[in-house]
Image (cartoon, grey):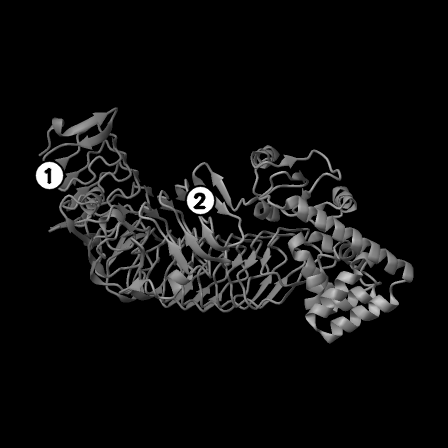
Amino acid sequence: MSNASDFIIENGVLTKYNGPGGDVVIPEGVTEIGERAFSLCNTIKDVVVSDSVTRISDHAFAECKSLESIVIPNSVTSIGEEAFTFCTSLKNVDLPESVADIGEKAFYKCPALANAEGFVVFHGILFYYAGPDGDVIIPREVTEIGKDAFWYSNISKVTIPDSVKKIGMRAFCSCELRNVSISGSVTSMGTKAFCSCKNLENVLISEGITCISDEMFQYCEELKRVVLPSSITNIGREAFCGCRNLANITIPDGVTDIGYGAFDSCGSLTDVIIPSGVKRIKSRTFGYCRSLKSVKITEGVTSIDMWAFSGYDNLISVRIPNSVTSIEEWAFNPVPIFFIEDISRMPSCHRPQAAVGFAISGGGKGTPGFESHSKYIKANAAKLVDTAMEELALLAMMCREKLITPKNVELYVEAAQKTGNAEAIALMLDYQANKISDKQKESVEKHREKEQATVDDRLKARQGKKGIKGLNIAVTGKLESFEKRDELKEFITRNGGYLASSLTSKVDYLIMNDPGSDSAKAHKAQKLGIEIITERQFNELAGRAFIMNKQALIKYVGVGGKVTIPNGVTSIGNYAFTGQKCLTSLLIPEGVTSIGEKAFCNCSNLIEIIIPESVRSIDSDAFEGTPIFEDGTHWEDNVLYLGHCLLKAKNSIRGAYAVKEGTQCIGSFAFVGCKKLKSVTIPDSVMSICDGVFFNSKCVFDGCLDLTIHAPTGSYAEQYAKENNIPFVAEEG
């Protein structure tokens, strides 16, 4: 029996139990059993709660593995989150009807509480499934499927009755399900509800459901077919991200919001129609949909964010409706041909292909959009020469509508001759002969001589100089990689240049992120012969390939190829190099200690990387989508190693695994999905194990039971195992 000295009680709250265990009676006068009051107390067996108690707080009895029974009186009205989680011996609970509020996972991983079918159910909430694999029929008494209830279960089929109103967060995450049917009675579905169900192929969602939650089907790699009802109004962030076999999906007309990255990395998706209710197409909504070949944007959409569509191989053209008023730079990458009436609504990087689209569609005088397109083409004829030689429809239209100004005729003739294309040569020779007067030809020659003299002067002036030293730089418009103008000024000054306050003939470059703009400054720069460059071009010119925050590399803005990260960098941030297709080789210097989430994700041509021994932390998916990750060269027995780091183990790994000798770092979520992994032998060389390494590997640290760590006594791995309550077996060093 209990003594008063066994308890620490403050203002009616029992905050800590220090007794010997066995049978415990909560003293009268206690009104609340506090958070973690009995947590990890493996000596208590039976508990009687006094009728003065009204609340059992979060984690109050968590991981009391010898606890077998608890009597809860009618006075209790609330039980907190994970109050009895991992009480693996708990088999008797008297839970009165007075308990109106039960927190998430209150009875999670309490297998001894399961009924004959394997369900742990209280007050209509299914907290945990401890039954057999295969087909499962959820009983009709269930109104809510709790958080993590089936997480990493091997069930292959589930029947959800129409009594269920709510499906909790990660309820079926990483199950072996193949088909799922969700009744229209369900009014709420939590984040990641069916995430990482690797075998899931078909999903039928009934009429009445209005929202697909964030990351709901994320990484369901075999998902081929999804039927969404017309009642759906919202598709959450990364809802279908990584569903690489999803070939088609119909987005209902009633949808008004599609979250960031909703269909990112759906590599088999070929066609998509954006309904008119969606006003904004967010960043990476269709990123890395490599098979995408048709996009229909319905009238009503008003804005398209940067990288909304990226990483595709087959998308040739896109028609932009008149309702779209904002398109961010590189909204489409690679850039397809655009059909748009008002070219001024396109970012500068997309305008050349919009001009091509106008030409292909038979654009000319009298057709809608001719005024804006002709104005742009005339002002940017010199910049369009390569595009015109590749797309002869554009060249033909420029000749037909006399959009090649006299000063650029010779440039176009020379370019046509260089291509060797008979049609291009004929077009330009005819244009030169018939569309230019003798007076204009004389003007062309004078302009050519003047331009050559200017180029020569610039070359002489630049001899022996590097970067922006000695250059006068002006800027107009909004900046992207500099937070403030003062930051740009400081950078230019520090590197020996000058930030001009106004446009004069002494200015060398005008930074303008929309160089095709018809602004007064753009016209003045052209009149003065000032070269207009984008901020990215300025970064290249200045050698500013890296955006830094003190010693942290935040973003890479260089041109790719072989890249060496500067000395002094200590960390590479989340998404720092994501999607840099031109990056082929990377040298990370000694001193870098951490690499962030998806830092090099989808750098599809990165074939060589050197990681120094100073690196102690590599976050999740840092190298996903790179040849290093995909080609198999660095995989050893289904485990990916890069230098001294273990990055990822395939889900097929099972039984016992020994980490390679000499390994110093195990990256975040390295063993995610390795459900059948029972033991890991970690050598003494390992000095760092990142967050969530055994996140889904049956370890105590994250709600799993079956993993054991084997390592030398006194090693970092032993310390890690003890800190995270993972069973540990000492091995000889």
Which is nearer the eye, 403 or 727?
A: 403
Q: Which residue is mark 1?
A: 23
The residue shown at (62%, 37%) is: 497
Which is nearer the eye, 370 or 732?
A: 732
- Horizontal and vertical percent for residue 419? 69, 70
Hey, what amino acid is under mark 1?
A: Asp
- Horizontal and vertical percent for residue 35? 26, 35
Question: Farthest residue toward the top?
Answer: 11
Hey, what amino acid is under mark 2?
A: Pro
Using the image, determine if residue 508 lies above or below residue 18: below
Q: Is residue 5 left or right of residue 400?
A: left
- Number of other residues with Cα within 10 Å of mark 2, as a class: few under 14, some 14 to 19, many 20 or more: some
Using the image, determine if residue 586 lies above or below residue 268: above
Residue 509 picture quarter:
top right
Sooner in the amino-acid sequence: mark 2 or mark 1: 1
Mark 2 near mark 1, Cβ–Cβ under 8 Å? no
- Horizontal and vertical percent for residue 720? 22, 44
